[in-house]
């Protein structure tokens, strides 16, 4: 072994300045092609990991969270042996010594250096631009500052009616602020849209309660006591504001490169191989100037990243520039533009207007080749037009119908499957992340992917703005045929077109806290919901807003309304809780007395080590519970979508092979977890040794006690489906094991769809994904644990005792004595 180490070639040192999306993608490509080629060190001025910057707008609007847009977490860097210096800004490059030096004095030597310093927001130097409350819109710090300001209410002015400005305005409006947009040009997004599309966009923006001021030039930002109070326009108009957001453009961050003598124009000048004027220094991303162009969209950056990864390991590759496309990430507004749509000599245009449906399309042609496209309202053909622009496709044969889109090009409707099949392998599917058709199909085949979630996890297609989800679904169907099950994207019921995932997400994003509010805001098609959606909404609201949302009993199934299981003859079964499967003579005596007193026909031991009293009349339920409560027994929740039982063996108390106190831990778990409402029933078991007498390896969560602690399993099933558990992780102590178990149940509570068992949820989101969030990310695990503990403050009350006191007594009173009526 020692000889092997001696013979291994020394790895070159690769240092990267910047940790944005471009270097992140470059690293992915590099590690995929040559995982051991370099010893990698990254300096990131931001105090955080790599995240999806183009998803900051959904974070601002509350539609998603920062955790959801992280691309590479801490574990990813550790797993790949990468040293990441977070919050360390590089201030100097010593090209002679081949070193970079950070502001805190950290030094790193390099053989190859990559500069990826991105860009900086442009701040208009008008009077008042340094007042507190003047913000840019560039990174998570800006978003957090805007969210904080929005919580205080008031008005916001956004300077800039471009892509970022409108996304910022929409996000602040969703957060509850009154918003004005001030734009210098006559139409919004004039660089991406023509006048007609700009008009439709303005109308849609104003319908969201945002006031738009075009041809408006900022004269000064007004303030008092060092803080913003408003904005004055050149025409004298004063707009009151508690914050002013500047979103007027970006500039490549090339100062560091310029200081050390690298060639810099508008950005750092690079070759087709992304090499700077120093052959050992490369640059990638928004800080770059390539063939006179600087890019601010992600697709070109990803193209550069692939080229740079190949270049670094000596492969032949060249970046030859990009044609870009633009989408607006504001919920409910669909627009797409690509290429050059300016008027010019020799250019023609084809326009389609559908006023009633708010659809506008314009194609600009030059020599029968599409050179630009603007779509508003229906952007489903954006990728198709974009692909033809990039290829320079001659559209002479379909000129009369091309404006209607791919399905009708040629005069007859085209099968969507045939359309997606006709796309070439390098046809772009996801513009946000630069993912092509061939890449997705390869991932589906090699990774065994069967749904959109899997494609997102492995390729990032559809993982950003999501507008290409339909194309991804078509590719899944095209590749898998009948094996593709699109059930995951089906509406949750006939009352809405939204799936469970969207409903859960929008409840959080829009702070919806009652069922009527959800139905109104999400445009339910029925007046009061149905038996499918009402229980689901009740659960989503209950789990999302613990302590705020009041449980709606009428939105529960009959078993949960009466806290007992209805049987086929109309009677009910009652299962008292026995903590960890332990009982006593007093409890058994009380159960026996109840069986005698109420003529219970059947007393059965369940598979979960509890006693089931079957055949109890509905009107007798409160009296049965009263007698059981008197003996100290409480509801076992055998009827609920909640914790059912924690099954145990006798462990070290009695067993010769027991390694831990499995009974005691089972009791502790059950007392800690009981009462927690979950998407579906949850069962646990704790076995004292690997002989597994409690059958922990077929439970939703199982524990196998071993000499070194607690081996924790999850995602088992022994009902309609039989499935062994997956190993989740290892807890050294009872406390650690308890934290892990509570955290995974909380993650399940927050992510699963109603009635989705743990094993189905885990398969959908990925077992490794669950492990990463619970085992690898200790901070996130503790957050989940604390949220679970908080929700339990409002859950652990015995419904039987409440009903005994008279709660919902009407539920248990018979409407009439039909036997007596018949006799009379």
Image: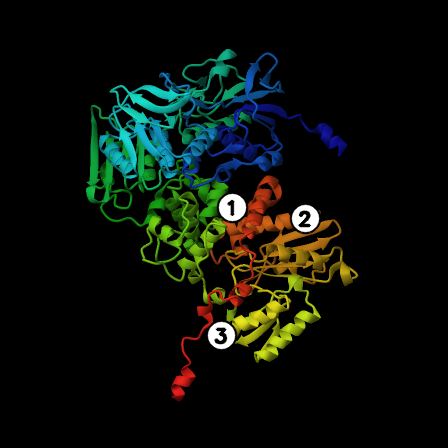
Q: State which mark lies toward you, 1 or 3.
A: 3
Is 804 situated above or below 352? Answer: below
The residue lying toward the viewer, choosing from 806 and 421, is 806
Is 562 situated above or below 704? Answer: below
User: What colour-coding does the image apply?
Assistant: rainbow
Is label 1 in a helix, a strand or a loop?
helix
Q: Mark 3 highlights which residue?
A: 619
Is label 2 in a helix, a strand or a loop?
helix
Query: Cα distance, mark 1 to mark 3?
Result: 59 Å
Is 91 situated above or below 55? Answer: above
Q: State which mark lies toward you, 1 or 2.
A: 2
Q: In which quarter of the image is residue 784?
A: top right
Residue 492 on image: x %, y %: 40, 55
Q: Mark 2 highlights which residue?
A: 735
Of callouts 1 and 2, the N-terminal one: 1
Q: Mark 1 highlights which residue?
A: 446
Q: Is residue 630 left or right of residue 558?
A: right
Q: Is residue 445 left or right of residue 102?
A: left
Q: In which quarter of the image is residue 700?
A: bottom right
Is label 3 in a helix, a strand or a loop?
helix
Query: Cα distance, mark 2 to mark 3?
Result: 43 Å
- Residue lying at the far bottom in this picture: please name it: 823
The residue lying toward the viewer, choosing from 500 and 738, is 738
Q: Is residue 631 left or right of residue 16?
A: right
Residue ID at (61%, 51%) = 741
Query: Cα distance, mark 1 to mark 2?
Result: 40 Å
Label 2 Cα neighbours within 10 Å, binned few <14 / some 14-19 / many ≥20? few
Residue ID at (45%, 64%) = 557
């Amino acid at each position: 072994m020692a000889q092997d180490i001696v013979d291994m070639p020394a790895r070159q040192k690769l240092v990267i300045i910047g940790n944005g999306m471009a270097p992140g993608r470059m690293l992915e490509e590099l590690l995929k092609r040559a995982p051991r080629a370099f010893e990698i060190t990254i300096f990131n001025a931001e105090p955080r990991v790599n995240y999806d910057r183009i998803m900051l707008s959904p974070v601002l609007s509350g539609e998603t969270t920062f955790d959801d847009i992280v691309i590479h977490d801490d574990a990813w860097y550790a797993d790949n042996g990468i040293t990441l210096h977070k919050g360390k800004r590089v201030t100097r490059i010593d090209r002679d010594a081949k070193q970079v030096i950070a502001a805190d004095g950290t030094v790193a030597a390099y053989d190859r250096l990559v500069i990826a310093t991105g860009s900086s927001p442009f701040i208009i130097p008008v009077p008042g631009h340094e007042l507190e409350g003047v913000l840019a819109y560039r990174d998570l710090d800006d978003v957090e500052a805007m969210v904080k300001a929005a919580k205080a209410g008031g008005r916001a002015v956004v300077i800039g009616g471009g892509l970022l400005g409108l996304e910022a305005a929409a996000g602040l409006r969703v957060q509850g602020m009154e918003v004005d947009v001030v734009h210098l040009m006559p139409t919004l997004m004039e660089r991406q849209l023509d006048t007609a599309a700009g008009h439709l966009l303005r109308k849609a923006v104003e319908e969201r309660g945002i006031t738009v001021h075009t041809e408006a030039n900022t004269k000064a930002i007004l303030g008092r006591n060092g803080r913003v109070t408003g904005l004055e326009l050149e025409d004298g108009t004063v707009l009151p504001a508690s914050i002013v957001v500047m979103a007027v453009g970006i500039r490549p961050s090339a100062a560091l490169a310029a200081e050390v003598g690298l060639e810099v124009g508008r950005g750092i000048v690079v070759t087709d191989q992304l090499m700077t004027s120093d052959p050992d220094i490369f640059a990638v991303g928004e800080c770059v100037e390539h063939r006179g162009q600087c890019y601010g969209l992600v697709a070109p950056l990803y193209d550069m990243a692939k080229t740079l990864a190949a270049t670094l390991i000596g492969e032949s590759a060249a970046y030859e520039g990009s044609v870009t496309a633009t989408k607006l990430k504001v919920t409910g507004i669909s627009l797409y533009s690509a290429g050059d749509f300016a008027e010019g000599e020799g250019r023609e245009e084809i326009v389609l207007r559908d006023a009633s449906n708010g659809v506008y399309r314009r194609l600009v042609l030059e020599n029968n080749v599409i050179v630009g496209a603007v779509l508003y309202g229906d952007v489903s053909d954006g990728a198709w037009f974009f692909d033809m622009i990039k290829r320079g496709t001659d559209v002479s044969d379909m000129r009369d119908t091309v404006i209607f889109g791919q399905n009708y090009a040629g005069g007859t409707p085209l099968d969507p499957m045939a359309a997606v099949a006709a796309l070439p392998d390098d046809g772009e599917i996801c513009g946000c992340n630069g993912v092509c058709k061939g890449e997705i199909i390869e991932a589906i085949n090699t990774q065994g992917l069967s749904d959109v979630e899997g494609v997102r996890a492995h390729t990032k297609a559809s993982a950003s703005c999501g507008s290409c989800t339909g194309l991804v679904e078509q590719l899944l169907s095209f590749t898998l045929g009948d094996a593709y099950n699109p059930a995951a994207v089906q509406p949750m019921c006939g009352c809405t077109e939204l799936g469970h995932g969207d409903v859960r997400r929008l409840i959080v994003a829009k702070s919806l806290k009652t069922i009527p509010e959800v139905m109104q805001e999400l445009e339910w098609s029925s007046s009061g919901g149905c038996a499918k959606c009402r229980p689901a909404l009740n659960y989503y609201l209950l789990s999302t807003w613990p302590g705020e949302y009041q449980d709606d009993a009428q939105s529960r199934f009959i078993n949960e309304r009466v806290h007992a299981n209805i049987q086929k003859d109309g009677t009910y079964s009652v299962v008292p809780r026995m903590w960890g499967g332990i009982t006593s003579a007093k409890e058994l005596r009380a159960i026996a007395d109840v069986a005698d007193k109420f003529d219970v026909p059947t007393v059965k031991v369940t598979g979960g080590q509890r006693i089931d009293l079957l055949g109890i009349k509905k009107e007798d339920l409160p009296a049965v519970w009263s007698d059981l409560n008197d003996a100290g027994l409480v509801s076992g929740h055998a009827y609920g979508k909640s914790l059912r039982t924690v099954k145990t063996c006798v462990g070290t108390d009695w067993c010769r092979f027991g390694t831990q106190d499995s009974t005691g831990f089972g009791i502790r778990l059950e007392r800690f977890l009981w009462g927690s409402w979950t998407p579906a029933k949850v069962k646990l078991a704790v076995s004292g040794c690997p002989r597994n007498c409690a059958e922990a390896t077929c439970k939703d969560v199982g524990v196998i006690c071993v000499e070194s602690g607690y081996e924790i399993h999850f995602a088992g099933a022994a009902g309609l489906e039989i499935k062994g558990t997956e190993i989740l992780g290892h807890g050294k102590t009872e406390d650690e094991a308890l934290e892990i178990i509570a955290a995974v149940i909380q993650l399940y509570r927050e992510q699963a769809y109603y009635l989705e068992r743990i094993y189905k949820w885990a398969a959908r989101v990925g077992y490794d994904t669950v492990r990463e969030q619970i085992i690898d990310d200790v901070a996130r695990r503790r957050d989940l644990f604390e949220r679970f503990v908080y929700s339990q403050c409002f859950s652990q009350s015995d419904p039987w005792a409440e009903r005994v006191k008279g709660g919902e007594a009407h539920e248990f009173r018979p409407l009439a004595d039909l036997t007596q009526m018949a006799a009379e």
